Image (cartoon, coloured by chain):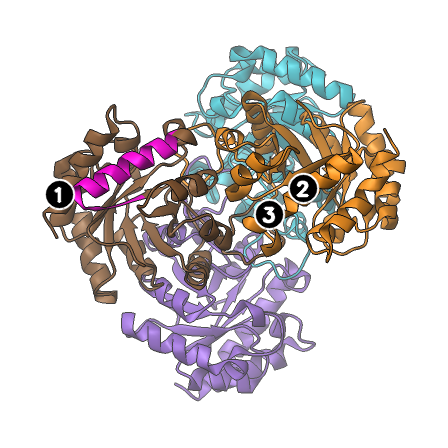
Chain colours: A cyan, B purple, C brown, D orange
């Protein structure tokens, strides 16, 4: 099973508002909107919440990171098999808040494939997105770190970053889904991201911190309904 | 609530045999022995298994690590609040497989106190154990990394490491529980560890890889019953 | 040979104004003031400049970091023996811009002793300063990171951090020199640092960025002359 | 100025036999062979030895790593400008003993270009070599880490790793020099490496630990003379 595009990915990060019981609440709201609008929404939750959320919703649940390890003596690390057994369908990787060594990105993508986890690998720039593409993850998310959490979306502020990224990745891989992250806040940001040639968006604070989760998720999901 | 001494801590690491459903099974065996022998046994499980295990057993459940972060934008990190809400009573820290910067050990102990988590901080040598003692965690575990997973217990092979550690820590803190780790495999290892002045043991492979979990946990728990 | 107290340590960091030929110039100005005022001034320079500077001045030259490695296969690392042979008398360690794992601070202090290098280990707080003291470096520098580079000296803004640090370290080690860092900019800052019970100061931007190096080094050295 | 191919790169690592005065001796032997046989030999020395060696030999001198920083407050880091001013023509990067985050490899290549340093970026596998190629360094070195220091050359033991790497990189960049590392010990290893389509070799222990440096460097350089 691979996630469908266009897609909205909600990164819960380690926000208090998206931890434990509240993570479950938020995931249920995302599921409700996904069903109502018939769009693909993925929730990327904390490790401790994967099982709880995955057992309670029918939309895909992701981890936010896994380590490139095999079962064994790795106290305190994130075992891909553990994340899988807890119910995750995939994982984010190399987010700007959890950057990885190049060799580890490669290893962890291979481990994820072995275990049956999808991988959405983040990158900060067109060049590094291309580098990621050569490693064949499930998808790539381009997130200029200077815009993360700002409310200024990359699709509005730096559309050329998106188009450059798409063009450079497409030379290496014609089909891999490309997602736009960083600062996505309004419906227009999502529309722009899709118009610029990407297949979805990665959103965190705009949704988690929204006063009305359902409204905000709907707002950001609507553009996805037009592309089916 | 603080764990009682003498104590047996079972570190599940990321062993396949101690992941997910099997983690729960192992934790239940530990709980059974803890009740039968009336001894304190703590299980340190993977993040993804904390909730499952904590809801199903009455013995203390620990994480294997937490990050020195506050709620917020920390994709892929281990939020102390999340570990607490999932049901953990405390956490291991600075294990030889997950060493930390000195400033972070301090920060994370402070964060754990804020959140109400106990901290068992590992150290590799008498000197570093003393350093850890100045930071006032709940307990200190001395684990010479060269003996971890060898089946050669530090209490037999290097008793002077234990006695030096105890003596150097006691100058700084008269009461803090000191635990012996690394290579603990047989009843005699635990007896020796207690005789040398420590208040418990930290065990991983000897238990997780044992053919008969119950027998092995009983064997290693028996010496604890003599000290009450 | 151990450096004398009171001492002024000038951290060249990786400032352009203190790199290569300019590092040599700045070191010569420091040497000039050290001789004129008969005070102890140490210059902590970049690795690439150690040999050049150490061959040209008679004041102690320090590295800014060394790695806890032995000679061998460690591409790109800082070998203590190499730093020693290049002419360094010692090294800074665990600066807020280059923090180390606790076990590595211990190892690297031991390696430095083997090789005959002095170690000035930085710490961010009273607690971590105490932890460092248990590891027996040559000296400890307390530098609250939030004041580094601000021009607001810790001795003025947070005198209690200094006095707490001194009191907590003195319980562990009666003699080890304690240095004050972070924001030291004016003569009064140095006077205060010495008055609060520390044996010297660690300064970077206030000197490196000064319009007149000689004047600024003299200003900050003068209080040292009163303590002999 | 860019290094010529075919090329022999001698990585001095942090071997005692290749530190300080001995680094200079070894570099002079390399220079002697380079002149006698008219081949391109690069020496990658420790930071502390760059200036000494670069001033004394006419062959290119490389650093073993640089950090992706600009001049400023970066205590203990490796400033590209400092390495350049000391006389380096380029630097190794991402060696298996000093792996880097993907975003940092990109940043540091850009910084090196700004400063006028060449970059030879190591990679462990065909996939990661391709990823590196998208970042446009001066050259790429493929070094399966499991063979480094073994005396078993990758060109003999795993020729398909080399041919796969060449083929995958050539799809991305038709011209970039590709070097073979890991276990290169004998003349045949170099011949094989060149025959498999790479433009040079990266050697450390086979040369540094050789009883007779001149003989070994000649042995490994001879195949280069046949390709001009």
> Badge 3, how many Cα within 10 Å: few under 14, some, many 20+?
many
Closer-to-camera residue (B130/D7): D7
Observer-side mark, 2 or 3, equals 3
Report the disc number at residue C223: 1
Which residue is disc 2 drawn over?
Answer: A103
Residue C23 is one of the magenta-drawn residues = yes
Residue at mark 2: chain: A
CA distance separating discs 2 and 1: 52 Å
Q: What stretch is highlighted in magenta?
A: C22-42
Q: Are marks 2 and 1 on the same chain?
A: no
> A164 left or right of A136?
left
Which residue is disc 3 drawn over?
Answer: D23
Observer-side mark, 1 or 3, equals 3
Instruction: List x then y, in percent, for residue C142.
Output: 27, 49
> C148 left or right of C106?
left
Residue at x-position 48% and y-position 21% = A147
Residue at mark 1: chain: C
Instruction: List x then y, in percent, for residue B78.
Output: 49, 47
Pick the quarter of the image with the C terminus of chain D. top right
What is the secondary structure assignment of the residue under circle 3? helix
Residue C30 is one of the magenta-drawn residues = yes
Residue D108 lies in quadrant:
top right
Residue D59 lies in quadrant:
top right
> Badge 1, how many Cα within 10 Å: few under 14, some, many 20+?
many
């Amino acid at each position: 099973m691979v996630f469908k595009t266009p897609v909205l990915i909600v990164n819960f990060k380690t926000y208090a508002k998206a931890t434990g019981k509240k993570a479950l609440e938020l995931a249920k709201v995302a599921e409700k909107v996904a069903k109502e609008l018939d769009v693909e929404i993925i929730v990327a939750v904390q490790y401790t919440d994967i099982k709880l959320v995955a057992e309670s919703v029918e939309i895909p649940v992701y981890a936010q990171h896994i380590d490139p390890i095999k079962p064994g003596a790795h106290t305190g690390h994130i075992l891909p098999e553990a994340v899988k057994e807890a119910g995750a369908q995939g994982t984010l990787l190399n987010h700007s808040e959890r950057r990885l060594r190049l060799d580890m990105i490669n290893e962890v993508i291979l481990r994820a494939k072995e275990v049956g986890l999808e991988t959405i690998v983040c990158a900060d720039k067109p060049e590094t997105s291309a580098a990621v593409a050569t490693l064949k993850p499930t998808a790539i998310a381009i997130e200029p770190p200077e815009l993360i959490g700002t409310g200024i979306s990359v699709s509005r502020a730096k559309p050329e970053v998106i188009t450059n990224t798409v063009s450079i990745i497409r030379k290496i891989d014609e089909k891999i889904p490309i997602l736009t992250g960083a600062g996505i806040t309004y419906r227009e940001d999502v529309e722009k991201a899709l118009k610029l040639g990407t297949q979805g968006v990665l959103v965190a604070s705009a949704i988690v911190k929204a006063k009305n989760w359902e409204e905000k998720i709907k707002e950001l999901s609507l553009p996805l309904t037009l592309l089916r």
